[in-house]
């Protein structure tokens, strides 16, 4: 065996499987859906909506709804997230 040659000459390469988009990444909630969770529709600012949309990639709809309700009650984003984690889970 010379320099740079591998002793594993019969290594089999695994074919990459293309999973459906649905399984690759969870869809992001729309601003309309997030706003529909709030009783007062004008409560959420555009910055809040943007942050909640990004957050929705990693959490369930139930978690997101609970967060919006908590934020409407006066809690911060972090506090409402912790409460939703305890009550609902991910």
Image (cartoon, helix red, strand yellow):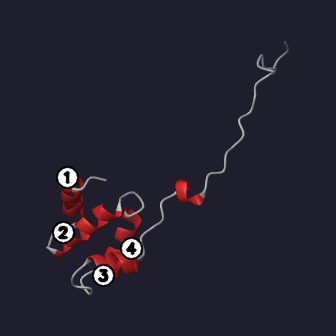
Q: Earlier in the sequence, mark 4 or mark 1?
A: 4
Residues under numbered marks 4 and 1 in contact, where contact means CB atoms less than 8 Å apart: no
> What kind of element bears circle 4?
helix
- The CA distance from mark 3 to mark 4 is 9 Å
- The CA distance from mark 2 to mark 3 is 15 Å
- Residue 86's disc is 1
Q: Which residue is mark 3?
A: 45
Residue 66 drawn at (x, y percent)? 23, 66
Residues under numbered marks 2 and 3 in contact, where contact means CB atoms less than 8 Å apart: no
In the image, residue 55 above or below residue 49: above
- Residue 50's disc is 4
Q: Nearer the viewer's eye, disc 1 or disc 3?
A: 1
Which residue does the image show at 20% across and 63% down from the upper left? 80
> What kind of element bears circle 1?
helix
Which residue does the image show at 28% across and 76% down from the upper left? 37
Residue 27 is left or right of residue 8, and the answer is left
- The CA distance from mark 2 to mark 4 is 17 Å
- Residue 70's disc is 2
Which residue does the image show at 14% across and 73% down from the upper left? 74
Q: Earlier in the sequence, mark 2 or mark 4?
A: 4
Q: Quadrant of residue 48?
A: bottom left
The residue carrying pointer 1 sits among few (fewer than 14), some (14 to 19) or many (20 or more) residues within 10 Å by Cα, namely few
Q: Earlier in the sequence, mark 2 or mark 3?
A: 3
Residue 32 is left or right of residue 14, and the answer is left
């Amino acid at each position: 065996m010379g320099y740079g040659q591998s002793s594993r000459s019969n290594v089999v390469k695994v074919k990459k499987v293309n999973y459906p988009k649905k399984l690759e990444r969870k869809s992001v909630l729309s601003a309309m859906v997030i706003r529909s969770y709030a009783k007062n529709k004008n409560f959420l600012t555009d910055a809040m909506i943007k942050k909640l949309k990004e957050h929705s990639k990693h959490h369930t709809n139930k978690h997101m709804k609970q967060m919006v309700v908590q934020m409407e009650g006066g809690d911060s984003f972090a506090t409402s997230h912790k409460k939703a984690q305890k009550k609902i889970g991910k």
